[in-house]
Image (tube, coloured by chain):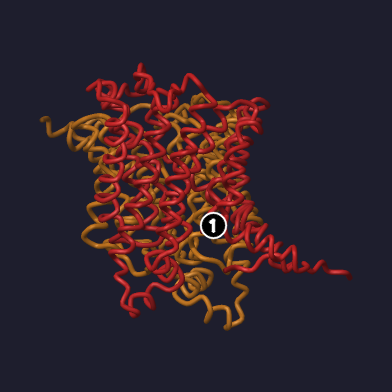
Chain colours: A red, B orange
């Protein structure tokens, strides 16, 4: 049987492209709004990709599964929202308040949760997010409860003579992309550093990592806090984009969303969160026009991913490319 | 506060604890034997209630329902184990957690599709309607019945595991899987049965609980959370511990509702976090 073996040119091209995912990512980000049925879907995809990238740090790279990451997404959104709604804070300040709230949550919950491991860890993270959900739901005077937080002042600022506001979808999209690229650069820098390598060490063999002198507890906590930071960024962004936040953003179904996205795209990979967010949200958008039972599809997707595609989309692609000699990890 | 009220709430809590004990034992059994965290355990509870509703509509007889529903759901459980969990047998515990999480999403949606998004009515069987006077405290007959049934089943379960051959296989499989296999016992068949049995317990709990609470598609989610809290407090792998823990949790929820109605939901989380802080492997935990 003729097996395809890549030639020299192909190898050189793919070595550049595939080992520097940014070369694939940037074009993808630029043309995405033209691929999706409407621009705001693309914006949503990028925001969720940021969320998933943050989650991926903890899940894909450190190997810790959290079922309650919606907590930081929701904290980011509510933090920014409450600042804007109740205190009429300037937009940039609200953004930072949201992120700070989410990160503080990450520090506190992370510290407590990391005293446990495995399934207990997953459950305790779930517990924290459900407590927050409950608070958001019952404190309706502050948060709007089931109605959610509405009437958020709209972001509108001028940069280089252009008005950036969610009312201008395409421009706003590229603004979000800018933030996403910034986040991705930071994550890339962090993961390709001794810190990043210690994450992999912990994921592969924790006790060995410990005996190598790695401060496992500290590294895990930092990883948790980082992931909550980026999740908070995504949350604050979604608020500014949607101008609305509901307790549902703290619910474990939202946590499930980000887990699926990361799994689907490929955990522990760079492009995974973006691919996953793209496929998931486009699929959801399309399926929702046909049926209300999107959750059924999600569930089945989940199961299929776990059983047959543990590497996700990107993982499967890399495996395929490796087999043909096109791809070899740096 | 009225003493009768408190005692009454405690008894309500014990009834809830009994139901939860059934659910938790089923969960603990599966975990102890197969090292699988079945996040979808609550879905089988939900199936129990819904199958019960359908069976009741067809047969009109609660007692027949009580017998056939656990059996039917048990079969569904066996199929689930075979098709979804078996392929994951070599893998990390996390994978079965993820897969069963997905299963929960799918199962909840299936319930919505078949029986509708709104809750359905489930009436108390005629024989058990009404309340009895227990020396000053009026307590519903149905709840007394549930207490008795769950108590009997737990004792029966304990006897089964301690005293029968199949029970000893289960105990062996729980403490040392490899050894049991090498003794020639076809452990995979036992696994399917145990999983199905665990689901049947959850379903039975669902049927029993149905007349006392609202039956709606997401009811399993609340129960699975409560189940997790129970197991976490008790420690994964300890069945007796999970029974005691269930009673504690049931009573705690019930008493918390006295203070502030919605508190029942959150107090268990706080309880769980508290326990995990002090003992990261649970109160009676034997397995990591």
Query: Which residue lies at the image location 55% right of the left edge and 45% below the top edge?
Result: A274
Give the residue drawn at x 63%, y 39%. Answer: A297
Q: Nearer the viewer, residue A258 or A161?
A: A161
Judge whether residue B73 can be spotted in this image: yes
Q: How many marks?
A: 1
Circle 1 chain: A
- Dot 1: what SS? loop
State whether residue B183 is above or below residue A273: below
Name the residue located 46 percent from the left edge and 49 percent from the top edge: A184
Picture layout, residue A220 above or below residue A29: below
Binning the other alpha carbons within 10 Å of mark 1 as few (below 14), some (14 to 19) or many (20 upward) gives many
- The residue sitting at the right extreme is A1
In the image as oriented, which residue stretches furthest toward the front?
A160
Is residue A140 or residue B75 the one in the foreground?
A140
- A289 relative to A191, above or below: above
Residue A23's spot in the image, x, y percent? 59, 51
Direction from residue A179 to residue A224 in the image, left or right:
left
- Name which quarter of the figure residue B255 lies in: top left
């Amino acid at each position: 049987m003729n097996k395809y073996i890549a030639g020299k040119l192909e190898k050189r091209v793919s070595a550049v492209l595939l080992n520097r995912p940014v070369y694939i990512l940037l074009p993808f980000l630029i043309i995405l709004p033209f691929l999706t049925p409407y621009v705001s879907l693309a914006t949503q995809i990028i925001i969720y990709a940021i969320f998933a990238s943050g989650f991926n740090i903890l899940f894909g790279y450190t190997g810790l599964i959290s079922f309650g990451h919606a907590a930081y997404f929701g904290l980011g959104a509510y933090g920014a929202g409450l600042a804007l709604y109740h205190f009429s804070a300037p937009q940039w300040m609200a953004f930072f308040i949201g992120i700070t709230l989410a990160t503080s949550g990450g520090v506190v919950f992370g510290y407590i949760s990391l005293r446990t491991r495995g399934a207990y860890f997953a459950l305790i993270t779930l517990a924290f997010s459900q407590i927050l959900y409950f608070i958001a739901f019952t404190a309706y005077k502050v948060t709007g409860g089931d109605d959610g937080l509405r009437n958020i002042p709209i972001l509108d600022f001028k940069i280089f003579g252009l008005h950036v506001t969610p009312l201008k979808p395409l421009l706003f999209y590229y603004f979000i992309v800018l933030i996403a690229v910034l986040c991705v650069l930071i994550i890339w820098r962090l993961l390709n550093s001794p810190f990043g390598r210690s994450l992999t060490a912990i994921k592969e063999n924790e006790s060995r990592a410990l005996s190598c002198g790695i401060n496992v507890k500290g590294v895990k906590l930092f990883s948790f806090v980082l992931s909550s930071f980026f999740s908070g960024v995504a949350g604050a962004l979604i608020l500014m984009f949607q101008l609305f936040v509901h307790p549902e953003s703290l619910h474990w179904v939202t946590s499930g969303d980000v887990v699926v996205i990361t799994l689907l795209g490929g955990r522990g990979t760079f492009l995974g969160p973006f691919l996953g967010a793209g496929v998931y949200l486009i699929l959801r958008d399309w399926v929702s026009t046909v049926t209300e039972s999107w959750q059924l599809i999600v569930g089945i997707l989940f199961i299929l991913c776990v059983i047959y595609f543990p590497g996700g989309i990107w993982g499967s692609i890399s495996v395929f490319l490796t087999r043909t000699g096109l791809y070899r990890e740096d | 506060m009225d003493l009768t009220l408190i005692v009454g709430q405690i008894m309500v809590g014990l009834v809830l604890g009994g139901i939860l004990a059934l659910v938790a034992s089923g969960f603990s059994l599966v975990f102890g034997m197969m090292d699988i965290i079945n996040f979808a355990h609550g879905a089988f509870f939900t199936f129990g209630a819904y199958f019960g509703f359908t069976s009741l509509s067809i047969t009109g007889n609660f007692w027949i329902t009580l017998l056939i529903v656990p059996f039917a759901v048990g079969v569904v459980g066996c199929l689930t184990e075979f098709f979804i969990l078996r392929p994951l047998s070599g893998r990390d515990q996390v994978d079965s957690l993820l897969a069963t999480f997905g299963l929960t999403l799918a199962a909840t949606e299936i319930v919505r599709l078949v029986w509708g998004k709104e809750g359905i009515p489930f009436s108390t069987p005629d024989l058990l309607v009404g309340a009895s006077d227990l020396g000053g405290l009026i307590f519903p007959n149905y709840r007394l019945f549930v207490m008795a049934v769950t108590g009997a089943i737990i004792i029966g379960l304990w006897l089964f595991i301690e005293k029968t051959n199949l029970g000893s296989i289960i105990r062996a499989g729980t403490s040392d899987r490899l050894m049991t296999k090498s003794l020639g016992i076809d452990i995979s068949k036992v696994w399917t049965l145990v999983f199905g049995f665990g689901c049947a317990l959850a379903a039975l709990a669902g049927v029993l609980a149905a007349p006392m609470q609202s039956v709606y598609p997401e009811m399993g989610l609340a129960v699975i959370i409560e189940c997790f809290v129970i197991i976490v407090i008790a420690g994964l792998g300890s069945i007796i511990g999970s029974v005691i823990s269930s009673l504690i949790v049931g009573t705690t929820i019930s008493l918390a509702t006295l203070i502030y109605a919605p508190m029942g939901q959150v107090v268990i989380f706080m309880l769980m976090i508290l326990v995990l802080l002090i003992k990261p492997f649970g109160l009676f935990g034997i397995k990591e």
